[in-house]
Image: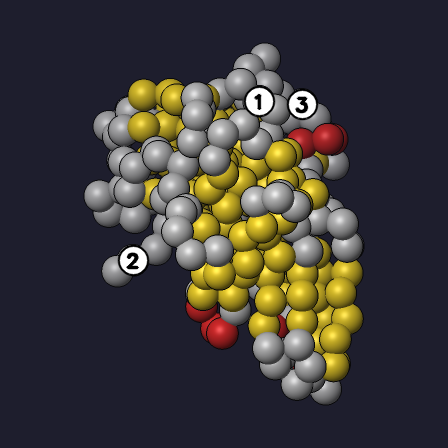
Amino acid sequence: AQSVAQPEDQVNVAEGNPLTVKCTYSVSGNPYLFWYVQYPNRGLQFLLKYITGDNLVKGSYGFEAEFNKSQTSFHLKKPSALVSDSALYFCAVSGNTGGFKTIFGAGTRLFVNA
Amino acid sequence: EAGVAQSPRYKIIEKRQSVAFWCNPISGHATLYWYQQILGQGPKLLIQFQNNGVVDDSQLPKDRFSAERLKGVDSTLKIQPAKLEDSAVYLCASSPSGGGSNEQFFGPGTRLTVL
């Protein structure tokens, strides 16, 4: 069965510092991996995805994520955090064998302090 | 390009009442999803449509929830009768196709409170 784990409920970082939001997954076959962001009173917005190829993928707003097959991880990173990055971040996975149901993690709330 | 539209944005009902949510996906998107997001949790897929056919409804509580997408465009999700534990945000999303590699585009959601 597919699963996604976001081990941190909350991440705090100072503005200008690098940030990392962690995600690990379990899926049969090769995974499709996604990061979404949710701002207050708004729906989820797509940030980036890994399908195949280069393990480092770049997305919107300066975010990037690194796919690590051996560690089954897909951590979200940004070199320099902004206060406006404060939001709820969701990692999601879908398998490419059998069904393509997307499973979301529980979310990590990011606080960037000025 | 217009995004995914949902209505209403907020709904308050009493338990055992019925409620319906509406979603209009991005034009041309074949796949439509309904998710339930309970406070503090990630979205949980309730049902996935490919055009007007159901692809996955394994987590839809079929004794009280129903959904349709009759013409392969907009969709309605209904709860009858509602329970207290149905209080959640109901998110609609769409994607060009159902293959797992496509990102999903989400609407603003409907926040349901069951009293």
Instruction: Please indicate whether residue B99 sits to the left or right of residue A113 in the image.
Output: left
| Whether residue B58 is situated above or below residue B28 in the rendered picture | above
Mark 2 or 1, nearer chain start: 2
Confirm whether circles 3 and 1 share one chain.
yes
Mark-to-mark CA distance, 3 and 2 = 35 Å
Would you say B52 lies left or right of B109 here? Answer: left
User: Label 2 is found on which chain of the structure?
Assistant: B
Other residues around mark 1 within 10 Å, as few (<14) / some (14–19) / many (≥20): few
| Crowd tier of the residue under label 3, counting other residues whose Cα lies within 10 Å: few below 14, some 14–19, many 20 or above | some
Q: Residue at x 58, y 50 (%)?
A: A68
Task: Give the labeled residue for mark 1.
Answer: B59
Picture quarter with the C terminus of chain A: bottom right
Q: Position of residue B87 (x, y in %)?
A: 68, 37
Instruction: Answer yes or no: are tags 3 and 2 on the same subunit.
Output: yes
Residue B46 seen in the figure: no
Judged from the image, the secondary structure of the residue bearing numbered disc 2 is loop
The residue that label 3 is drawn on is B16
Q: Chain of mark 3?
A: B
Q: Which residue is mark 2?
A: B2
Going by the numbered disc 2, the residue's amino acid type is Ala
User: Tag 3's secondary structure?
Assistant: loop
Q: Report if the CB atoms under discs 3 and 1 are less than 8 Å apart.
A: no
Look at 48% across and 55% down and name the residue there: A55
In front: label 3 or label 2: 2
The first of marks 3 and 1 along the sequence is: 3
As shown in the figure, which amino acid type bears the numbered disc 1? Gln
Note whether residue A71 is visible.
yes
